Image (cartoon, grey):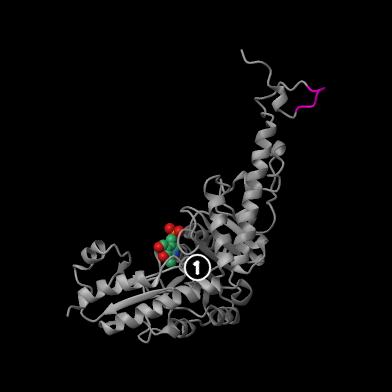
Amino acid sequence: MLPCQRHLFDIPEDVAYLNCAYMSPLMRSVVEAGKRGMARAEEFRATAARLLDAPAECVAIVSSASYGIATAALNLPVQKGQRILVLDEQFPSNYYPWQRLAEDRGAALLTVPWPEDGDWTSAVLNHLHDGVAIAAFPNVQWTTGGRLDLVRIGEACRKIGAALVLDLTQSLGALPFSVREVQPDFAVAANYKWLMGPYTTGLLYVAPKWHDGRPLEENWIQRANARDFASLILYTDKYDAGARRFDMGERSNFALLPAATRALKQLLEWGVEEISETAGALNRQLAAGALDLGFSSPPEELRAPHYLCLRRQAGIPEELPEILARKKAFVSVRGSSIRVTPHVYNSANDAERLISCLREIAGP
Ligand SMILES: Cc1ncc(COP(=O)(O)O)c(C=O)c1O
C-alpha cells in the first residue's frame, strides 16, 4: 500500500474529497506544469507577433500552413458566383482548401496565370476586380522566388472588399513583413523553413474582425476557463481572448514550442532586414556567377533576395544530382530550375562550391 500522498495535492485540511470519479483534484506539480505550459504558449505568441508586426492578441498557434488556411476557409464568406483568386502553381496547402470551398459554395476558383515578364504583382492587380471575395497568395512564389508587393495587393483587396489570406511560409523571417502595412485577414507560416523552428508548429495571424469566428477544433485549452484547471468541465460557450480560440489542440507541446520560440527570438536578434540582406548578397554573387555559365534568374527587382531560382535554356541535365552529391552541395531542383535558398550559416565558400557544380554542367 502507498502511504497517503495528500501532501502533493492542494486539498483544504477540512475537506474529505472522495470524488475522483467526478474529477481528480490536481497535484500542485501538475498545476505548476500546466501554468508553465500556458506561459510557454503566450511566450511563443508574443514572439511571433513581433515578427509579424502585429498584436499578440491576433496570433494563434497552429500545426501547419494547411491548418491556418483551413481556418481561414472555414470563416470567410463567399457566395455562389463569386470568385476565389490564387496564383498559377500555388503551393497545394494554399490551393486545395480554396478548391473545396469554391465547390461547396458554388464559387469559381480563378488562377492568376504565370506572368511572361515575371511580374506577379501586376498580374495579381489585373485580376483583382469586383466579384473576388477571397484572394489567397504567398509573399514569394515558391518555384521562382517571384515576389508579390503585398502592400499594393492589400490596398487593392480592401478597395473591392475582398478578403486577403497569406501563406508566408516561404518568406516570414527572411523577408520583412508587416501586418500593419499589409492588413491581411489571415496570414499563416509553417515554422520549419525560414522561421528555423521544428516541424509541426506554425503561427497564424487573424485580423480582429474575425476574432468571433469558428475554430477548426473545439478543444479545452482555447476556452475562457482553461486557466482554471478545476473548472474545465463546467462547460462554457466562451472562448479565450483574441485569436487564442484558433489555437490547435495540445498547442503547448513541451518539446516543440520552446524550440520554436527560441528560433523566433534568434531571428529577431539577427534582424529580418539583416537576414534578407545577408542571404540576398550571397544570392547576388551566385546569380552573377551562374549567369556567366549560361543560367538565368528572375531580375532582382522582381524576386525575393533570399530566394534564387536558376534556369538554363538547355534544361537541367540528369547528372546534376550526382554532381551535387559528390560535392556535398545541397539545393533543390524544382521542375526546370535549381532553387538556391541560403541563410546566415552560408559563406562565400559554399557559394563557390555550388558554382563549381554548375561549371561541371556547363562544360568547358
Ligand atoms: C509555400 C509553402 N507553403 C506551405 C508549405 C508547407 O505546408 P504545410 O505546413 O501545410 O505542410 C510549404 C512547404 O514546402 C510551402 O513551400
Residue that mark 1 sits on: 168
Q: Is residue 42 above or below residue 195?
A: above
* Residue 83 seen: no
Q: Nearer the viewer, residue 359 or 301?
A: 359
How far across and down, in percent of the image, does residue 120 sit? 43, 81
Nearer the observer, 271 or 26: 271
Q: Position of residue 152 (x, y in %)?
A: 55, 82
Instruction: Tell me which secondary structure the magenta stretch mostly adopts.
Output: loop
Q: Secondary structure at mark 1?
A: loop
**For residue 14: magenta?**
yes
Residue placed at 56% from the left, 56% from the top?
262
Image point (59%, 53%), residue name: 247
Determine the residue located farthest toward the left in the rendered image.
364
Assign the N terminus to one quadrant of the image: top right
First to last magenta residue range? 11-15
Q: Nearer the viewer, residue 169 or 319?
A: 319
